[in-house]
Image (spheres, helix red, strand yellow):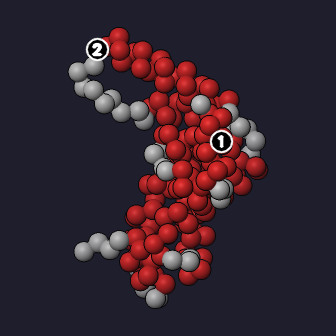
Amino acid sequence: MSQSLKESVISYNKGDNTAFDQIYAKIYRPLFVSAKIYLKNEEDAQDAVQDACILIMRDMKNIKGPGSAMAWCQTIIRNVCLNKLRKNKDVNLDEDSEYIMNNIKETDKDAIPEDAFMGKEKSSIILNLVALLPLAQREASLLHYVHGHSVTEVAELTNSTTGTVKSRLNCFL
């Protein structure tokens, strides 16, 4: 039977090293998606997740409240990605748009082709505008509008206050 992330963290902290396999299975995909948004490159994102998992495994015993493990892991991947970005200033911002466009799901299977095209065109324009935003605003916008995190969750993930996140999101509008 599969344990929840919280239960796996508790087991790992009690000395069950095999519990990290379960933790890894639960955190890999969300961390990879976040890393890909920041780094715009699949290989770099995989490297970032690997680096983050090493830090997570090393520091898991320091977590304050296993219930917040995913937010803590997201903070680690964010910091790993930002460190990589600082080291490598050659990131192409247009790849954000390409990544999101490739992952937009068709919500209406019977959509008229012209409507579908116009929807993609509008999305493309919006994503091009997002790419022009400063990193902090782009980060908040992508986490909130693309990944569906609440303002409070975005604040936790970015180590900001909810007021700061709201301000960053307001600048997006």
Which residue, given by chain and number where applicable, does mark 2 sit on?
112
In the image, residue 118 sits, relative to residue 143, either above or below, namely: above
Residue 64 place in picture, x, y as percent: 56, 77
Q: Nearer the viewer, mark 1 or mark 2?
A: 1
Question: Is label 1 in a helix, a strand or a loop?
Answer: helix
Residue 152 place in picture, x, y as percent: 54, 55
* Residue at 40% across, 64% down: 25
Q: Is residue 35 visible?
A: yes
Q: Residue furthest front?
A: 163
Name the side, left or right, on which 18 lies relative to 49.
left
Three-letter code for the amino acid on which mark 1 is drawn? Arg
Residue 91 place in picture, x, y as percent: 69, 38
Q: Nearer the viewer, residue 124 or 155?
A: 155
* Residue at 49% across, 64% down: 70
Quadrant where the image shows the C terminus = top right
Three-letter code for the amino acid on which mark 2 is drawn? Ile
* Residue at 35% across, 71% down: 4
Q: Which mark is residue 66?
A: none
Q: Residues within 10 Å of mark 2 (few under 14, many from 20)?
A: few
Q: CA distance from mark 1 to mark 2?
A: 35 Å
Q: Is residue 21 visible?
A: no
Which residue, given by chain and number where applicable, does mark 1 sit on?
168
Residue 97 place in picture, x, y as percent: 55, 30
Q: Residue furthest bottom?
A: 14
* Residue at 40% across, 63% down: 26
Mark found first going from the N terminus, 1 or 2: 2
Q: How many marks?
A: 2
